[in-house]
Amino acid sequence: MAKPPSITQPNDPTTMRTRRSRLGQNRRRGSAMVEFAIAAPLLFFFFFAAFEFCRVAMIRHTVDNAVYEGCRQAIVPGATSGVARSTAANILGTLGLSGSTITVTPSTITNQTPDVTLTVEVSLDDNTFVPPQFFGGKKITRTLTMQREASNL
C-alpha cells in the first residue's frame, strides 16, 4: 500500500536535504554573528577617528581665521587690543570653543605702534566630541603679526 504524498520517509533524499540546509543556515548565522562581533568595533573605531580628525581640522581652520580677523581689526587706526580680542573670541565662539587664550601684543595700541601681534591658543582636551584619545594634551596655537595702517590725515 502506498503512503500519501504528504508523509515522507525518514530516509527520503528531499527530507535529508532540507535538514542539511537548515543545519547550514544555523551555522552560517553563527559565523555572521562572530564576523559582526569582530568587524563592528573596528568600524566604530575608524568612524570616530575620522570624525575626530575632521573636528580638529575644523578647529585649526577656525583658529587661523580668528587670528587673521582679530589682527586685521587691530591694525586699523583707532583700534584697541580689546576689539581684536573680542573679534577673535566671537569667531572662536562660532564653534563653541572653550579654554582659549587670546593675547594681543602690545597690550596698548597707539598711533605710534608699528606692528600688532595676535596669538590664539586653543586646548583640544576641552573641545573634542569624543574622549581625547588621539589629541590628548595637545593645543593649537597660531600667531600672526601685521604692520599697522598709518593714519597720515
Image (cartoon, rainbow, N blue to C red):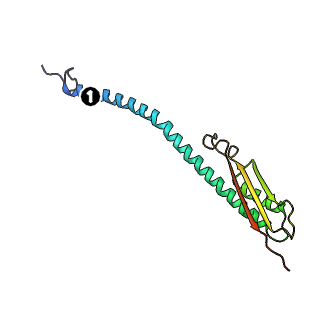
> For the image shown, how many numbered marks are present on the structure?
1
Residue at left 79%, top 68%? 75
Where does residue 32 sit, x and y in percent of width and height? 40, 33
SS of the residue at dot 1?
A: helix
The N terminus - image quarter: top left
Please report the residue visible at 74 percent of the width from the left and 55 percent of the height from the top: 120
Q: Nearer the viewer, residue 145 or 57?
A: 145
From the viewer's perspective, tell me whether residue 142 is left or right of residue 27.
Answer: right
Percent across and percent down for residue 64 are: 68, 59
Observer able to see residue 152: yes
Which of the 4 image quadrants contains residue 129? top right
Quarter-of-image position of residue 80: bottom right
Q: On the rendered structure, is 132 left or right of 88?
A: left
Looking at the picture, does residue 138 appear above or below residue 11? below
**Viewer-closest of 74 and 113:** 113
Looking at the picture, how far across and down is residue 10, in whole percent?
21, 20
Q: Residues within 10 Å of mark 1 (few under 14, many from 20)?
A: few
On the rendered structure, is 9 left or right of 89? left
Give the farthest residue toward the bottom: 153
Q: Residue furthest left?
A: 1
Kindly identify the residue that appears in the image at 73 percent across and 52 percent down: 121
The C terminus, quarter of image: bottom right
**Which amino acid lies under the numbered mark 1 shown in the image of this protein?**
Thr
One can see residue 93 in this view: no
- Image coordinates of residue 2 in percent, x first then y, are 13, 22
- Find disc 1 in the rendering and name its residue: 18
